[in-house]
């Protein structure tokens, strides 16, 4: 293989949003298909009501969830204050008529940072690694495990919390976010993040 030579990377600072369907791997093939359809329809409706131009987002599906890179000019308050509550409400309406095995419940993570938009198979950049760690962390999984009435559990990176939530942009209420510790790459000690469940008060406890 020949050396492709130097590449001028296409960089951008963007808001990042990732989702994962709970217990996806334990579902049958038809149930996975149904969960995907429920998720996609709920996301489309929630994005429309939140005024988020979903067609302009860069989407990287993974079957049990996806990564969304927000378009330039669309900022995190739109996701946290509008999209997440609307998405949770859509899933609540679906789940209230289903048995536990057929409910569609989501974990979601919100972060931002400098990434490459021209990766051969994705979007290179450390913020994406942090986002993946947040989405998969134990404290976020615990919210769904400990609160069966919750359809959507979200985790917000410390950077986004301090810049967006703490400033109450979009009418956000910091008291509805609970601090937690998360193992993040590149940190000698656990990083800090904040969890919430739109439509529910998890209580503000120590990390």
Image (tube, helix red, strand yellow):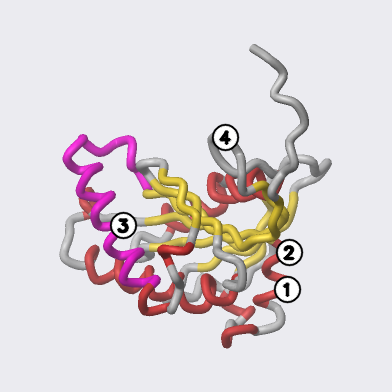
* Between discs 3 and 4, the one toward the N terminus: 3
Q: Which residues are magenta?
A: 22-47
* Between discs 4 and 1, the one toward the N terminus: 4
Q: Secondary structure at mark 3?
A: helix
* Between discs 2 and 3, the one toward the N terminus: 3
Mark 4–mark 1 distance (CA, rounded to whole Å): 31 Å
Residues at discs 1 and 2 in contact (Cβ within 8 Å) = yes
* Between discs 4 and 2, the one toward the N terminus: 4
In the image, residue 83 sits, relative to residue 187, either above or below, namely below
Q: Which residue is mark 1?
A: 163
Q: Looking at the image, is mark 3 or mark 4 nearer the viewer?
A: 4
- Magenta stretch encompasses residue 32: yes
Q: Position of residue 166 (x, y in %)?
A: 70, 78
Mark 3–mark 4 distance (CA, rounded to whole Å): 27 Å
Q: Position of residue 116 (x, y in %)?
A: 67, 47
Q: Which residue is mark 2?
A: 159
Q: Which residue is mark 3?
A: 39
Residues at discs 4 and 1 in contact (Cβ within 8 Å) = no
Q: Secondary structure at mark 2?
A: helix
At horizontal 42% and vertical 52% (from top left) the residue drawn is 145
Query: Could you say which disc has been placed on residue 120 in the image?
Result: 4
Mark 1–mark 2 distance (CA, rounded to whole Å): 6 Å
């Amino acid at each position: 293989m020949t050396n492709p030579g130097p590449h001028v990377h296409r960089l951008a600072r963007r808001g990042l949003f990732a989702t994962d369907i709970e217990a996806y791997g334990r579902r049958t093939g038809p149930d996975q298909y149904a969960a995907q359809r429920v998720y996609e329809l709920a996301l489309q409706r929630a994005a429309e009501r939140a005024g988020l131009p979903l067609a302009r987002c860069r989407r990287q599906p993974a079957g049990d969830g996806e990564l969304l890179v927000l378009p330039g000019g669309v900022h995190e308050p739109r996701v946290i204050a509008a999209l997440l509550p609307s998405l949770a409400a859509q899933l609540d309406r679906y789940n209230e008529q289903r048995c536990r095995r057929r409910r569609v419940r989501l974990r979601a993570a919100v972060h931002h940072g400098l990434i490459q938009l021209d990766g051969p198979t994705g979007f290179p950049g450390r913020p994406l690694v942090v986002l993946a760690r947040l989405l998969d962390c134990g404290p976020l999984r615990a919210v769904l495990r400990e609160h069966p009435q919750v359809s959507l559990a979200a985790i917000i990176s410390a950077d986004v919390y301090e810049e967006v939530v703490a400033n109450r942009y979009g009418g956000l209420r910091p008291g509805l976010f609970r601090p937690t510790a998360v193992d993040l790459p590149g940190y000698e000690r656990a990083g800090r993040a904040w969890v919430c469940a739109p439509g529910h008060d998890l209580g503000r406890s120590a990390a």
